[in-house]
Image: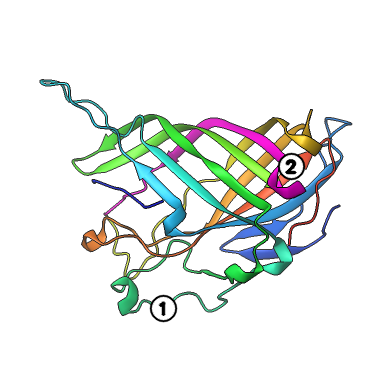
Amino acid sequence: MKFIITAATIFFSATIGGVVAQAPEPAPNDADLIYSRGYYTIISQDDFTTIIPTIGTPGFVLNDIIGTQQFQAGPILALESVKFDDEGITPDDDNNDQLYAGNTQPLFSPESVDPTFFMDGGCTATDGNRIGNDIQQILAHSCVFNLCLGGGGFNCLALYCGTSFIFAPLDNNQNTKKTPPSLPPAYPCTIFGGTNAFQGARGTVDIFTITGSTNPAKLNTPPQGLITQLLNVISNVPLPPAP
């Protein structure tokens, strides 16, 4: 895919960009949600796609951020298996001197990936507005993901995430050669079942984005960089360790 744009519990803890990466505590208000684990998913630009809707109604100015879709796919990895550049990322010619969102990148080797552990799906902007002439701000989104954790790639949790989500992905107001682009806010998801070992699953997943790409609005260049998301999963069924 391409980026298309017209405008058992592991007690591991680390801090990346102010986010504490650790296995979450079981839910105190639901006696069945006793299993918890943290995972990373790492998404390359080839597996992250943005589709902006085409609006063809003559005589009307519509808010074209509503209906914008972003699709992603990436491997699932254990927290302790991913390291980050502790010194931050220095701009260089490879990304036209643009900083990465989060000002760090994972030290990631594709050879470590188990193809049966992955997450894919996407989000649609369900509310939004314009700020001035150029900046489009998402105000809410609706997402559906498959979170697959082994079993030949068929042990999958179904996630739905429908919440407010205030984020301007193409904010062009700051100098991103000196200040990293903003990361999107964290958002919650609900587990609404699953397949194979996860039939009847329920629970929650909190998603934190902790590394991101360069700003594609700068210099009209394609975005570069790996997107890393931390998944805090709480479930009523056992959660296997990731590779």
Asked if disc 2 and disc 1 are in contact, CB closer than 8 Å, the reply is no
Q: Secondary structure at mark 1?
A: loop
Q: Is residue 229 above or below residue 62?
A: below
Find disc 1 in the rendering and name its residue: 90
Q: In the image shown, does 24 or 131 lie closer to the viewer?
A: 24
Q: Does 153 appear in magenta? A: yes
* Residue type marked 1: Thr
Start-end of magenta stretch: 149-172
Q: Does 13 appear in magenta? A: no
Task: Tell me what residue is drawn at x 22 percent, y 59 percent.
Answer: 220
Q: Distance from label 2 to label 1 (Cα)?
A: 40 Å
Q: Which mark is residue 155?
A: 2
The answer to whether residue 25 is visible is no
Q: In the image shown, does 179 or 202 lie closer to the viewer?
A: 202
Q: Is residue 39 above or below residue 106?
A: above
Q: Which quadrant of the view contains residue 125?
A: top left
Give residue 144's position: percent from left, percent from top: 56, 34
Q: Is residue 65 above or below residue 5?
A: above
Q: Residues within 10 Å of mark 2 (few under 14, many from 20)?
A: some
Give residue 89's position: percent from left, percent from top: 45, 75
Task: Tell me what residue is drawn at x 62 percent, y 39 percent.
Answer: 146
Upstream in sequence: badge 2 or badge 1: 1
Give residue 150's position: percent from left, percent from top: 74, 50
